[in-house]
Amino acid sequence: MTLRTAALFLMGLGLGVGGCDKAQPAPGTTAPPLDSVTLGYFANVTHAQAVLGVSSGDFQTALEPTQLKTKVFNAGPELIQALNAGAVDIGYVGPGPVLSADVNSDGQAVRVISGSAANGVVIVASKESGIYSFADLKGKRIATPQLGNTQDVSARHYVTATLGQPDASNVKEVRNSQQSGMMARGLIDAAWVPEPWGARLINETGAVLIGEEKDLWPNHEFSLTVIVTTPKFLAKHPDIIQKILTVHHQWTVRLSGHSTDYADQLNDALVALGGKKMPSDVIRAALGRTEFTDDPLPETFKTMEQWSHDLTFIKSAPDLTGLFETDIIHGVISSEPARQP
């Protein structure tokens, strides 16, 4: 997939939202070297480039002498809040919180600088829930990682727009790490979650895989994780952005071709972040449902923009022109040959 999306980038077809990128900072305007830079991400399979780039030391090596600091989050709204507060400089996050940040700041808060992952979201149900298909989710207690995060927006849209519920009050905010215990106790019926949390629920509770969210999208593909920063940081430190994106792209190439080759390494890295060691087949299943790409798939943002507006997460549809500033990742893709793992 990476080779396809890289080609799309280079032909200029990857920016299908309101025209081309905003003007980039003029050459020679970079700020003095930073003492440190803070990267935010989640302990998820769907953030594998970040997890592996940090655990391998690749990000730190590329940034020398600047020190890499990291913050790990449960879901996107928390990360965006940290980005807005200056506690994070660059982050891996989903489209839903990015859109909220964009509209709430009149387009001034955030810039998408690369894609990272597509798909990788599953809907699983307790074996006692009586849920055997997407249609059976109507009225059931569905857990999502956080109110307003990307899975939460998708789940709420589905139960109201497709299943015809009058509201989405049955969609509950439950932290990923708490869902297994709640499902085992019968407190939730289903979960709409990114990997590896779905695979973990299947393994730990005997949950049933109802389907993948990609099956609900017209082209069976949607953007799940992108890389963001602030306009100010991008303007002042394009050198830092380039170093981060170069390592990111290297891991994207490796994972897009042979993701399961890195299953054990990823498993160990997730454990080091406080997670539970997963059986080999569980993490391989999670990786198999996730695609890794440098393309942010802007069409996803156009769709989720409408969903978020319908759900009143955003008051008005944002003008997405300028949200995507991807010249640096374009340059990385075109100048660095794909590396073999």
Image: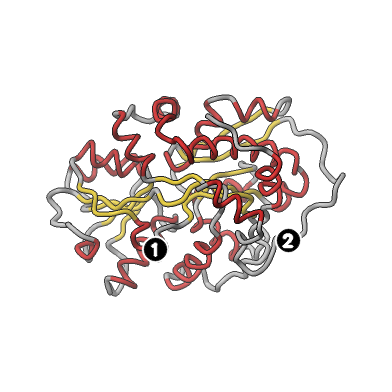
- Amino acid at the residue labelled 1: Trp
Q: Few, some or many C-alpha atoms within 10 Å of disc 2 (few <14, some 14-19, many ≥20)?
A: some
Q: Is residue 257 left or right of residue 244?
A: left
Gap between marks 1 and 2, in whole Å?
Answer: 29 Å
Farthest right residue in view: 28
Q: Amino acid at mark 2?
A: Lys
At x 70% / y 60%, what residue is drawn? 21
Q: How many marks?
A: 2
**Mark 2 = which residue?**
22
Q: Where does the image place residue 145, in percent across and percent down from the top left? A: 38, 49
What x and y, as percent, mark residue 43?
44, 37
- Image coordinates of residue 80 in percent, x first then y, are 55, 50
| Label 1 residue SS | loop
Q: Eyeballing the image, is 223 above or below 35?
A: below
Residue for point 37% across, 43% down: 195
Local crowd at mark 1 within 10 Å, few (<14), some, or many (≥20)? few
Residue that carries the numbered disc 1 in the rendered image: 217
Residue at the image position 52 percent from the left and 29 percent from the top: 341
Q: Earlier in the sequence, mark 1 or mark 2?
A: 2
Residue sitting nearer the eye, 125 or 48: 48
Is residue 282 at all visible to an observer of this figure?
yes
* Whether residue 81 can be seen here: no
Q: Are marks 1 and 2 in contact (CB under 8 Å)?
A: no
List x then y, in percent, for residue 336: 68, 38
Under tag 2, what secondary structure? loop
- Above or below, 163 against 123 in this view is below
Q: Against 305, is 295 above or below?
A: above
